[in-house]
Amino acid sequence: NKVLIQRFPHNFVNMGETKGKNTGDESPAQPKASWHAMGLSACIKEMGLDENVTSTGLTSAQAAQRLEKYGPNRMTEGKKKTLLERIWDQVANLLVLLLVIIALFAIFAAVAGSIKGDSQSVLTNTIQVCLIALVITTNTIIGVVQEGSAEKAAEALKGMLSADALLFRNGKEIVVPAGEVVPGDVVCLGTGDKIPADLRMFAVSNIACGEAALTGESVPIDKSIDAIEAAGNPELTPLGDRHNMAFSATLVAQGTGKGIAIATGDYTQIGTINALVSTVEKKKTNVLLQIDNISKILAVLIMIASTCTFLAALYIEEMEAFDAVMVALTCAVGMIPEGLEAIVTMTYAWAVSNMAQHNAIIRALPAVETLGSVTVICSDKTGTLTQNKMSVVAYVTSNAHYRVDVNASDRVNTNFVRDDSYLAERADHQANKSLDKVIADGPNTAVPRRGKAEASNHYAIDNLENAPPSQHGQGAADEDEYPFANGDCPTLSFIKNAIVGGVLCSHCVLGTDGTREGEIGNPTELSILRAAYNAGVDVEGIKEKNKIVAEVPFSSAYKFMSTVHEPDAEIDGPGMDDKWVVHVKGAPDRMLALCDTQAKAGVIGELEPIRRTRWTEQIATLSSHGLRVLALCRATVPKSELKAGDQLGPGFVNERPKKEWLTMVGLCAIQDPPRPECIDAISEAHRAGVRVAMITGDHKDTAIAIGTTLGLVDEKYPSGITGPELDEMSEDQLKAAVLEYNIFARSSPENKLQIVKALQAQKQVSSMTGDGVNDAPSLKQADMGVAMGLEGTDVAREASDMILADDNFATIVYAVREGRVVWDNLRKVLLVNTPINNAQGMSVLFGLIFKLGTPLNPIQILYSNLICAITLGFVTAIEPAEQGIMDIPPRRVGKRLIGRFLFLRILLGTFALILTVLLSLAWCRKEYSLYPIRKDELGHIFEKEDSYYNTTADNVMMNVTESDFTEFVDGEKDKLRDLQSIAFNTLDLGAIAICLSARFSYNYSLHPRIFKGNKYCWYSIIFVLALQFLITYVPGLNTIVFIMNPMTLKMWGISVAGMVITFIIMELEKVVRNYLKAKGSDTDDLEPTVFDRKDDRTTHMNMPADAAQLGTAELKS
């Protein structure tokens, strides 16, 4: 940790300081030391234990004392929100407060109406209160249900802990709950046990522990008891190399053993990861922050508009104060976007549903929006960018190169094609290096990766004679056409005979139909069986016909395997009855040293002297391209030399009187090939301005070779960098490196966290993939953590924002595309909803200002908000991607959801709707002589026309009775219903026009495309129109609930005309905007403006001090 602090000095988080705080645990820190580097006696002394603790264990009193001192063996849980807190989070905003105030006034108005006997007022206000309550309740329920679940990563970690533990206390074995294990306890382990605490082993019997979830090492680790010597800081020893330690939550794969508990609870390795996961703060996405800001701005605008409406009602219309307040609240109801939160949630939910169908499972809805801002995708190699299936990609004979199609779906011999230019020369970055350097950099090196006990390639090269670097290119095949011309496909017989040694010299079993399902054996060896199977060879038939007579089993000490068989005339030729056929498969350097002949052009039975230099360069060439190389050899021995069932040792092959006695048949070049769809996906990501970086534990050459094929290595990013090189860098150097390289080889989980931090310090928005427990902190830290669904652990999945159900990189790019679609569609939603809301409220205000009356009532407004705005808004929320969405750069951090041009479009839409509503009102008044009436203090009744009171004999009625006046007023109220009918329908038809135009940002909607791509558009429009007709014509529903009259045909004509006018206005705006864009104007708001939120992310890396505990063991290859 001191090394980390020196390299990353800024704002360190000390995980140890946070432990226990959430539960009020004030227990002192547990003893901390480099236990693996200490002898057993030193460990016992450091723990403050009795010298004979290994034979007696703790006493009950000592255990109770330590339990009191150090606390129970469990991990600290973070504070969780209660249901009431979650509900409060949903309702604690200004818009909800305004709705509550409006509801209270409506309740008061209903009570007042009841006292006065005004049944219409009671009904109207009661419905209004119920609708407001429904709005608030619906939005709250949606928000609570869809809110991301609380830190489930900690729960997943807790699920990994054991329930019980077998301890040695008071001189005897006892079983106790795992939570009662204390530092100093002697723990007894057996096969299948889940380890309850971190242990320093002191007794082992063939014990090995599966630590894949913690260290990434897929093979169980054999345990020992001796102290581990470390050069330098012992804390930097990878967890996978601490063979005298057993770790909490891992599993005993075999054997038995005993160990002293040196850490429990939060102080275990798994507890440290829990702390790293728990301390990462939950981030609120840009959209949610902006929706909050939009709500605040709207609240201010609503209060201003409502105040103006109140004044207009009070002084222009001369209403009573309470009536003026109710009209002002009607304006407020109209402008409050009651359905905005619901439609935003629906937009996310729709995107989540779509992505789930394409194997991208989103764990928190707002994470969808983050995808659209991603600038760098950091991906694992194996299984994500590659197929996680070792495959023979090339077969090399003495004179030719055969390219193998690993993606073919048919089992035919044409999967092999002679292509002498394929892998014929060394990779450019290895062109002039010495042979030993080429081997050391590639997958055939015998040097183990960090944190591994031995080389991952069992057939690694460690003794290949050097070929001069100047012979670059001499690996090219001879220019002869025997037995097949360049470009031709070999026969099935040739393929079978050439690679039969790899099939027979193997105990591997292919999976179902050649897949990985049910396969058994080493992946490298299986690749040869799979190549034969895919070429049409009857693999099982050959193995059944040519059974093993005797064998030399494989060992990493001599790196080959040999089997002996009866001769097969079809493969070996005639006249072999007195001989055994020997097949040998092994490391190419070991095999080459034992060969004196080669199969001419790979043809069995035609021999010629070995060309050692050529084969050496072939091995170097293939290795430089990151390929594993396996040599296939054969020979014959007299049947008198051995008999069936003999147990043969390696000397049968490498200690014969004639050392060089084998025939080199060919070389298999093996690789985990790239997923073919990933090539296109990465190209699409690059076109979209998204960098793709590969992070792998594999060797540099292999990573570069895969990266070159995928398009990650180019002129701008020509090389790669390794984890050890990153470890030696300062913070500034590391921040520069993450922008200079796309290939990060031999990387550890700690390196992943460093890379994420460095990218964020460089103001990048990063996506990071991972599958292990020790990947959880980097997944949590990344802007978009992506876990593997097939190969990943539950902890990694719970720490992530998204899960890949198919572990496929192409799915990430699809998700990025959908993230951009969501952003675009949210803008379209605002373009539909905001003008509708604004027009509802502002129509009331301007209707009063222009003395046209109150065009809409609260019930109509709430209906439009809940049904019309949400339904039409949903149309744009689910709109498919527009052409070119992946041809623009990622959205910058802080970009406003409502930019300059969207703001102008919203204003234009609002203006168009208000204009058409007011024009329809003016027409209706003129057409049907609908004017408001007044009664003066003398009892005179006036009709208000053209803003003046006329007192001529034609317009004044003197000395009317009260009943006459009531009848007159009722008639005028009926006329008011006509006004509200035409205003209501004109507004909602105009909303349909806004929706149709908003479906396309730049393309014109007046085009046949309007009928394609989104069937729900027309379903929604039909639904809205059907409801409009029902509301307008169903008796009681129209006059009593919505307080409106049926529409005449002429009135419908005016409303449809308003719809057409609105549509034309919105489409003309596109004409102007497309013209400006063609002239170079930034109509997409790509450049920062003064209205954008400042990117205030830190430029310091802030590495957690306990990050070193993740270990430096390299990731899987």
Image: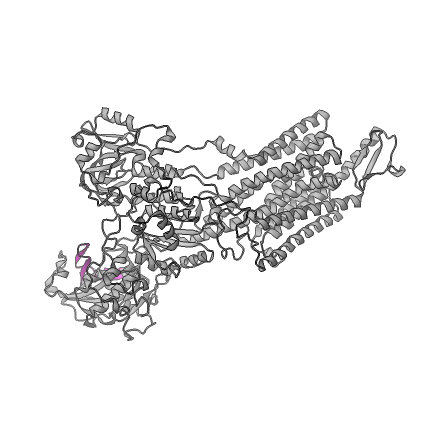
x and y, in percent, of residue 665 in the image: 22, 67
With respect to residue 700, does 118 lie above or below? above
Give the residue displayed 88% in from the left and 30% down from the top. Answer: 959
Viewer-proximal residue, 271 or 719?
719
135 to 453, vertically: above or below: above
Q: Give 489 or 564, whichever is nearer the viewer.
A: 489
Q: Is residue 1045 shown to the viewer in this render?
A: no
Q: In which quarter of the view is residue 424 placed?
A: bottom left
Q: Is residue 917 left or right of residue 291?
A: right
Residue 609: say if magenta: no
The total of numbered circles placed on residues is 0
Instruction: State whether residue 854 is above or below residue 1007.
Output: above
Q: In which quarter of the image is residue 651?
A: bottom left
Query: Residue 85: image x %, image y %?
Result: 48, 31
Question: Residue lying farthest right?
Answer: 953
Q: Report the front residue among 855 and 758.
A: 758
- Percent x, y of residue 1090: 55, 47
Task: Name the quadrant of the N terminus.
Answer: top left
**Residue 454 horizontal/vertical position (percent):** 22, 51
Q: What coloring was used for the rendering?
A: one colour
Q: Which residue shows up at 32% across the image and 40% down it?
A: 1106
Q: Does the magenta stretch include residue 554?
A: yes
The answer to whether any part of residue 372 appears in the image is yes
Range covered by the magenta-colored residues: 540-565
Say left or right for 438 vs 762. Answer: left
